[in-house]
Amino acid sequence: MITLLLLAAILLLVVVVVIFFIATYNKFKRLKNAAEATLGQIKVALKKRLDMISELVDSVKSYAKFEKETLQKITEMRSSVMKGGAKDVEKIEKETRRILSNIKVDVEKYQEIKTSETVKKLMDAISSIEDEIARHRYTYNNIVQEYNTMVDVIPSSWVASAFSFSKMHYLEFEEIERPETGWSV
């Protein structure tokens, strides 16, 4: 009778451990999938911003001289934004901010451009997309924080070790120094 109770207790313990491992594994997978989906939303928003920057360049290029290299860079980033991971997204985001900052400086030089409705609408659209990117980045980093915490803490770290789950990379967008333009959208 005691052997049977001991066997039942061991079996119950094994079932609880297996259920814990399955539940924790599934939570890791849900968090990873949520992070990848949010990163995908960030990529789509970055692509939209690049499209808007491209339209903005087209709108102002008759006034301001843009290097051929800048136009090529925008095209390259538009085609590569969906392919990369979190680190690639950081690079593209930083470069688009730099290009946009330079465009704003050029726009400031020409009164005709500053007062153009098309330019104002494009700048508003870009600003809206930047807010969208910031919201998605916040969500992504919260998901990554929860995932990374699970990788670090016991007992979920045991599951992470068993399935070789490693920490995910946070999105850290650097704020580039913006030149004073005196022009606001």
Image (cartoon, helix red, strand yellow):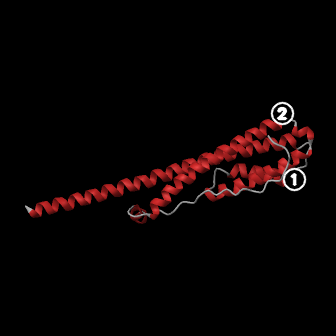
Q: Are marks 1 and 2 in contact (CB under 8 Å)?
A: no
Q: Is residue 30 above or below residue 8?
A: above
- Quadrant containing the C terminus is top right
Question: Residue drawn 39% across and 56% down?
Answer: 24
Question: Residue drawn 40% across and 56% down?
Answer: 25
Q: Amino acid under label 2?
A: Glu
Dot 2 lies on which element?
helix
* CA separation in Å, label 1 and label 2: 24 Å
**Which of labels 1 and 2 is toward the front?**
2
Q: Which mark is residue 164?
A: none
Q: Amino acid under label 1?
A: Glu
Q: Is residue 112 above or below residue 30?
A: above
Give whichever of 28, 183 is nearer the camera. 183
Question: Residue drawn 75% across and 52% down?
Answer: 97
Around disc 2, counting alpha carbons within 10 Å, would you say few (fewer than 14), some (14 to 19), or many (20 or more)? few
Side of 32 relative to 177 (left or right): left
Q: Which residue is mark 1?
A: 67
Around disc 1, counting alpha carbons within 10 Å, would you say few (fewer than 14), some (14 to 19), or many (20 or more)? few
Dot 1 lies on which element?
loop
Give the image location of residue 116, x and y in percent. 86, 35
Q: Is residue 96 above or below residue 123?
A: below
Give the image location of residue 144, x and y in percent. 53, 56
Give the image location of residue 146, x and y in percent. 49, 55
Q: Which residue is mark 2?
A: 117
Side of 58 relative to 3 (left or right): right
Question: Residue drawn 31% across and 54% down?
Answer: 19
- Quadrant containing the N terminus is bottom left
Q: Earlier in the sequence, mark 1 or mark 2?
A: 1
Give the image location of residue 64, x and y in percent. 90, 46
Residue extending farthest to the left is 1
Residue extending farthest to the top is 117
Give whichever of 68, 97 is nearer the camera. 97
